Amino acid sequence: MGITITPLNSGFCTSNPKTYHYHPSTHKYYANVSGEDRRLPVFCYLLNTGSELILVDTGMADSDRANRYHHPGSEQLPDQAMPRAVEKAGYRVEDISRIIFTHLHWDHTFYMKEFSNAKYYAQKKEYEFALNPLPLYYKSYEYQWLGLEAPFLGCEFQLLDGEEEIVPGIRVYPTPGHSPGHQAVEVDTGDGTYHLVGDAVFLMDNFKPIPEIGYDVTPSARFVSLTDWWESVREIKRRCPNMDMILPTHEPALVERFAKTLVLGG
């Protein structure tokens, strides 16, 4: 039996299509781009290799913190907090042996310290930036200037420098752009190789070309480097031409898909 993937939704964050999901140059090519906020899921992924359990990200904060400091209208039900979500899926928190972080933003790292038996993995570039971000990204990393303590402070990481195999069948590769050290996770399963791409894209629409303006992808509106973002999305498409095998964090269509398919790769 190969590696299986159990999607776990840690809640819903609100964000605006015009300022997050679609670059201003693309708005007129998408009918669904409005000024109204959308509720996006915040998925994490539990990987079962048969010999150990590995999480990809630990999800968003509780509703109060998410609304107060980040995105008003966000919601996390009690059983969506990642430790509870893991238990609801039939596993024990103490049995999680590793956590791979796509990046270290607030909605991908909360509750990480509750997984006290796990080793933490992140790209070195991401960790260094998270400790001293530009002011524009203070909220993203819950920088101490805001009077907050980021979930990752005081944690020891296995710092990665580029592409690397974590365990047989699970690899990471750099996908910077959304953040300086963002990474995607390749997972070999009985169904084929899935790519867990975090926030490299917000929506699957971001993979679509816009031939009218010569774009081979649809850029988002939230990034630290659009050049890096564009090359990373091209790289994901090169590695994984089958869009069904790409699993972002925030794609709304995944809610319905995962309601029908609770485990992938089995």
Image (cartoon, helix red, strand yellow):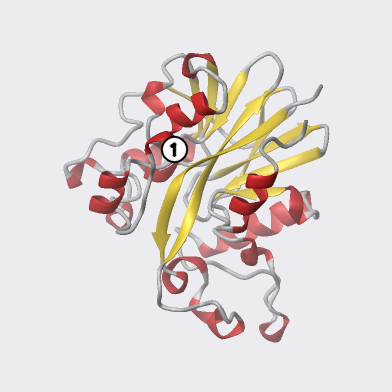
Front in this rendered view, residue 48 or 138: 48
> In the rendered view, does 1 fall on the left or right side of 161?
right
Label 1: which secondary element:
helix
Q: Position of residue 236 (x, y in %)?
A: 70, 52
* Total numbered badges shown on the rendered structure: 1
Question: Residue at left 45%, top 58%?
Answer: 224
Location of residue 98 by image quarter: top right
Residue 56 position (above or below residue 202): above
Q: Residues within 10 Å of mark 1 (few under 14, many from 20)?
A: many
> In the rendered view, does 70 fall on the left or right side of 24?
left
Amino acid carrying mark 1 in the image: Gln
> In the rendered view, does 198 fall on the left or right side of 143?
right
Please state, as top left, top right, bottom left or bottom right, where the N terminus lies in the image: top right
Q: Which residue is mark 1?
A: 80
Q: Position of residue 60 (x, y in %)?
A: 40, 42
Q: Position of residue 221 (x, y in %)?
A: 48, 68
Question: Residue at left 49%, top 60%?
Answer: 225
